[in-house]
Image (cartoon, helix red, strand yellow):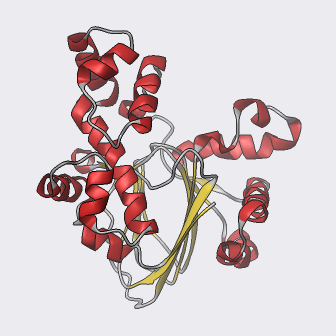
Amino acid sequence: MLTNVIREITPLTQSDCFTLFSRVKKKFDFPLHYHEEYELNLILNAKGAKRIVGDHIDLIDDLELVLIGPNQYHAWFTHQAESEEITEVTIQFNKDLFSDNLLKKNQLSFVRNMLERSQRGILFSKSTIQRLKPRILELSQKSGFDSVLELLSILHDLSISRNMQTLSDATFNNEQSNYNSRRIEKAFEYMNANFNREISLAEVAKIANMPEASFSRFIKKRTGITFIDSLNEIRLGHASRLLIDTTQTIAEIAYKCGFNNISHFNRIFKRKKMCTPKEFRENYSGSRIFV
């Protein structure tokens, strides 16, 4: 199972507090994956679908609310679900929405504990879902600061709820995604700031204060992928955001994100996202907001 796990590059940027995506569909079609953001997933009318979080596999009921921590493997599959109107509301937020210092405050102790437990995935009780479902469904109607306050309030109410179930085993984690290196962070910050132009390995190695060959081995060891693949993933993340947010042509988006060959862009996009840029844009034709 783990050989086919996809690292998802979400459209969420460092300047966003969170993103919310809502749609009604007939089936689940996104493969087993992980990403650096927290994800709160509300799923309705999908009884019989299969959920995978880490090493935990289960069939779900008609009410499903799960919080997934950063870099935890997860996916939902249609399996035995027969509904033609599966409702899915996905909220993703960056790890730095809550700073370490903020989480140390007494008033945030329940939220801190919940976020720590979410590294293994948390399934919330039916009574909790019934109570908070209207607020989650209505969150897309709010905007700006009000929407951020409402999300924080929802997360707090979830953190003090009863009978939450931890899903994956404590010994199961995605070690490959934990870089734990300031040099890698600086390299990624630089690539994120300059993704729209040509960037060389030597250029980024200099930012990391390492010889080119050493940095090439270092980034592969820390991330599990090459420098070029890391750069392409960053570019694909920005391209995904433009596909959702704008009506620019696919060619325009490709060139704006540092790809100088549209065929190369299409090929890499399909390999990483399991769909073409056109299909990706169509899949996100539901309600998507960034705050």
| Rendered residue at 78%/35% (across/down) | 102
Question: Which quadrant of the structure image shows residue 213?
Answer: top left
Image quarter hosting the C terminus: bottom right
Is 48 in front, or is 140? 140
Q: Is residue 17 visible?
A: yes
| Rendered residue at 75%/56% (across/down) | 152
Q: Is residue 78 visible?
A: no
Position of residue 91 relative to residue 227, above or below, is below
Position of residue 276 relative to residue 156, above or below, is below
| Rendered residue at 33%/30% (across/down) | 223
Residue 288 image offset from top left, x and y in percent = 52, 71
Position of residue 19 relative to residue 173, above or below, is below
Residue 92 image offset from top left, x and y in percent = 55, 57
Position of residue 254 relative to residue 115, above or below, is below
Is 185 in front, or is 176? 185
Is 204 in front, or is 81? 204
Q: Residue furthest left?
A: 263
